[in-house]
Image (spheres, helix red, strand yellow):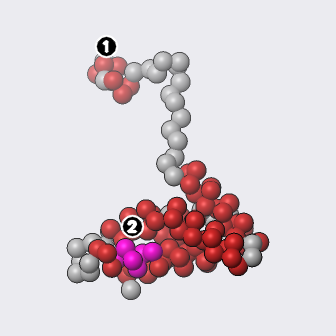
Amino acid sequence: MSDAQENSQYRAHPGGRRPERRRRGNRQAVYTRRLLAKAKQADSRRRDRIHQEAALLNMDMARSVASRYWGRGEQSEDLVQVAYVGLMKAIRGYDPDRGDDFRSYAVPTITGEVKR
């Protein structure tokens, strides 16, 4: 047997095919896009509730963007708070009709807000 065959990562999977890898967060991205598409047609009270739900879904993303800038002189709580402000700006400015993923729109918006 060769080295590649002995290594466990190269062994054949039971069933003959390699299982598909699912992208993490893909379901959340689809759900966020659907939520924000509903928000475009909703009245202001319902729109605010939808925006709040989208913000709660994506808080971890904002926190992870803010964590890139920890240890540079600002307190981490301040950075996270500014990242949440950037997240709310991204939620209000996102247009699901363009077909872009919400994350690809939100990360630069949040990053720009944190850098200020």
Q: Quarter of the image containing the C terminus?
A: bottom left
- The residue labelled by disc 2 is 63
Report the disc number at residue 61.
Answer: none
Q: Quarter of the image containing the N terminus?
A: top left
Prevailing secondary structure of the magenta residues: helix
Report the span colored magenta. Answer: 79-84
Residue appearing at x 37%, y 73% in the figure: 80
Horizontally, is 36 left or right of 89 in the view? right
Of the residues shown, which amino acid type is indicated by label 2?
A: Arg
- The residue labelled by disc 1 is 1
4 relative to 64, above or below: above
69 relative to 19, above or below: below
Q: Residue furthest front?
A: 45
Q: CA distance from mark 1 to mark 2?
A: 48 Å
Residue appearing at x 51%, y 52% in the figure: 25
20 relative to 72, above or below: above
| Secondary structure state at the residue bearing disc 1 | loop
Residue 95 rendering spot, x and y as whole percentages: 67, 72
Q: Residue furthest right?
A: 41
Q: Quadrant of residue 41?
A: bottom right
